[in-house]
Amino acid sequence: MAYNTKGVFYLDTSIATTTGAGDGIATLDLSSYVQPIARGRTKGQGLAIYKVWWDIADAGSNGPVDAATTGTFRAGLISFTGLPAAAVGGASLTNEIIAADNDLMISGVDFWGGGTAAGDPHPNVWLEPSTEVPYIVVRDQVALMVSVTTAMNNAANVNVRLECGIMTLDSATLNQLLRTQTV
């Protein structure tokens, strides 16, 4: 499917950091958009994610994160099944799960606070799909994962918005995607 604005829709999810370090997971159920099994003449379908927008906002005001905020975290949107949702501090992510070399990664962002009134908090998007080459999800779930490595002095909300479309897949493409999106 070529990028077509008529077939585009949006999905979103979010997770809140705390003022402590730790890992957290928010899940987004995609089962109504994904059909990884071709039946009869019906082809399988996947969810094409063309763009991911990241929004890191102050949890108390929903405005921009205060410039004096300290702390660091890495967040990623991952095509992943099997991990339950958990607040920050309630999950334990394995090393290198939120990394560009993980085949399940859709998009990722790093955040580090400036720590001074004059300093800006810096989000850095380091991985994202494109309208030319979308990430095609063929699993029932994506997870927004966050790993707070240095405690934050102010909690923040990590929000993502996905620009998506349904993509019909031939058997060979579907099988390849199922193999690459298996843990």
Image: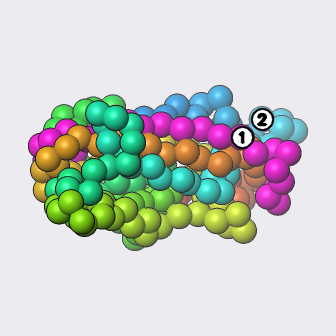
Question: Where's residue 171, x and y in %?
Answer: 74, 53
Q: Is residue 145 left or right of residue 72?
A: right
Rendered image: mark on residue 9 = 1
Pointer 2 or 1: first along the chain: 1
Residue found 21% across the figure and 60% down from its top: 117
Does 3 appear in magenta?
A: yes
Say few, some or many: other residues with alpha carbon within 10 Å of mark 1 (under 14 / 14 to 19 / 20 or more): few
Side of 175 where 148 appears, left or right: left
Disc assigned to residue 157: none
User: How dense is the environment of label 2, judged by Cα within 10 Å: few (below 14), some, or many (20 and up)?
Assistant: few
Residue 65: x %, y % from top left: 32, 49
Q: Element under label 2?
A: loop
Q: In which quarter of the image is the N terminus?
A: bottom right
Against 29, residue 160 (above or below) is below
Q: Position of residue 23 (x, y in %)?
A: 22, 45
Quarter-wise, where is residue 90 in the image? top left
Q: Which amino acid does label 2 sit on?
A: Arg
Name the residue at the front extreme. Answer: 118
Q: Can residue 181 be seen in this view?
A: no
| Three-letter code for the amino acid on which mark 1 is drawn | Phe
- Report the number of discs: 2
Give the camera-side residue of 116 and 74: 116
| Cα–Cα gap, marks 2 and 1 | 25 Å
**In the drawing, does residue 64 fall left or right of residue 32?**
left
* Secondary element at tag 1: strand
Q: Quadrant of residue 80?
A: top left
Residue 39 is marked as 2
Q: Which range is magenta? A: 1-26
Q: How is the image coloured?
A: rainbow
Q: What residue do we see at 20% from left, 56% from top? A: 68
User: Is residue 94 in the magenta section?
Assistant: no
Label 2 vs label 1, nearer the camera: 1
